[in-house]
Every structure is written in structure tokens, then in C-alpha cells.
Amino acid sequence: MQIDDSGAWEYFNESIRVAASQRQDVRLALEFQPHEPHARIMLSNVGILLHVLDEVALNNVGANLDIGHSFAALETPAESVALLARKGRLFYLHTNDNTGDGGDWDMISGSIHFWHWLELLLVLDRVGYEGWLGADINPKHMGPEQAFAANNRMIRNMIELLNQIGPAKMVKMVKKNGNSGEIYEYLSKQLIS
């Protein structure tokens, strides 16, 4: 036994309530992190984050969704966005990518999970997200200015590609058949042409 879970959660939620109540005109964005080598993380996935937001029950408390953390938690970021947006709690996004092996590698967006990123951008558009896309990246082989420029360029290129593919057509096919051969055939033709 490492922690009094019941007491720890009550203390955690009450701490957030007290902090957020001080200035209700200021939004507090919580970010989950699935793994930390030095400690057990309580706020470790989107489901727990949604539970905390429900328990705290303050309109100025929401989520900063770090896309790399979502991959590290073995989630689909598009689904995490949809869940948070349904509750009106998607306040901010940290753009990045990682291998999904539990590490927090802060790589350039779309460098590993390109297709997941396209799906994420599609869902962000569908839920009407108009907030900021921050970058939480730390590439090892380039400086910060070059890294941020590359990250922004990659996201813009993925948005342009998604627009060329046709978001409305994709949504229609997904609603009709889900993950089908028709979708793969359509994507293949769009990418080649």
C-alpha cells in the first residue's frame, strides 16, 4: 500500500476547487501524464481527468490535452478530444508526438502517428475547437526555433492534406462503414493524385 487513495483524491479535488475558486474569471487547465519515473501519477489518463472535472464541478476548470501524453496512455487523441469537447472542457492543446511506449518524447507532431494526427485534426474541426495549439516539443537534433517552425509547418501541412482529402467525405464514409476498405481505397487515391 503506497497511498490512501480515498483521502488523496479528496485532497486533490479540494485543492483544485480552492485554487480555481480564487479567480473564477481565470481558467485552470489540468493536464494528465500517464507515467513518471519518480512518482505514481494520480491524473494519468483522460477518463480520470474527466472524473476529476466532474467532481470539481467548476466551469473554469478544464483540460490541457497533451497529444503525446494521450499516445503514452495508449489512447486515441481524437477520442480524447471528442470526450473533453462533449463536456465543454477542452481548454488547450499541447501539440507533439511520441512513440506510445510510455515515454514523454515530445517529438514533432505527426512524425510517428501521422494518420492519428489527421484523425485528430478532423475531430478538432468537427467539435468546433477554436483554442490555441501550443507546442510541447523537445527534438534532440535541432534548435528550439527550427523545431517550433518544423512543428507548425507539419501541422499546417496535415491540415492542408486533410482539406484536400475532403473531411466531409471522410466523415460520411466513417459514419457509413467505420474502418473499411472503402476508406483505405479512397485515401490511397487521394494521396496518389
Image: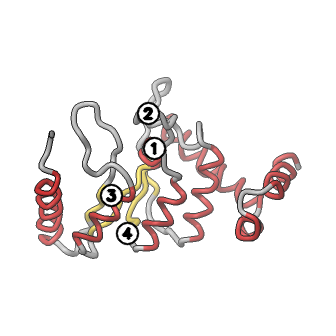
| Residue 61, quarter of picture | bottom left
Of label 1 and label 3, which has the lower sequence position? 3
Few, some or many C-alpha atoms within 10 Å of disc 2 (few <14, some 14-19, many ≥20)? many
97 displayed left or right of 191: left
Q: What is the spatial separation of the Cα atoms under label 1 and label 4, in whole angstroms?
A: 19 Å
- Residue type at mark 1 is Gly
Of label 4 and label 3, which has the lower sequence position? 3
Disc 1 target residue: 68
- Residue 105 numbered tag: 2
| Residue 119, quarter of picture | bottom right
Q: What is the spatial separation of the Cα atoms under label 2 and label 4, in whole angstroms?
A: 25 Å
Few, some or many C-alpha atoms within 10 Å of disc 1 (few <14, some 14-19, many ≥20)? many
The nearer-to-camera label among 2 and 3 is: 3
Q: Secondary structure at mark 1?
A: helix
Disc 4 target residue: 89
Q: Secondary structure at mark 2?
A: loop
The nearer-to-camera label among 4 and 3 is: 3
Of label 2 and label 3, which has the lower sequence position? 3
Few, some or many C-alpha atoms within 10 Å of disc 3 (few <14, some 14-19, many ≥20)? few
Q: What is the spatial separation of the Cα atoms under label 1 and label 3, in whole angstroms?
A: 17 Å
Of label 1 and label 4, which has the lower sequence position? 1
Q: What is the spatial separation of the Cα atoms under label 4 and label 3, in whole angstroms?
A: 13 Å
- Residue type at mark 3 is Ile
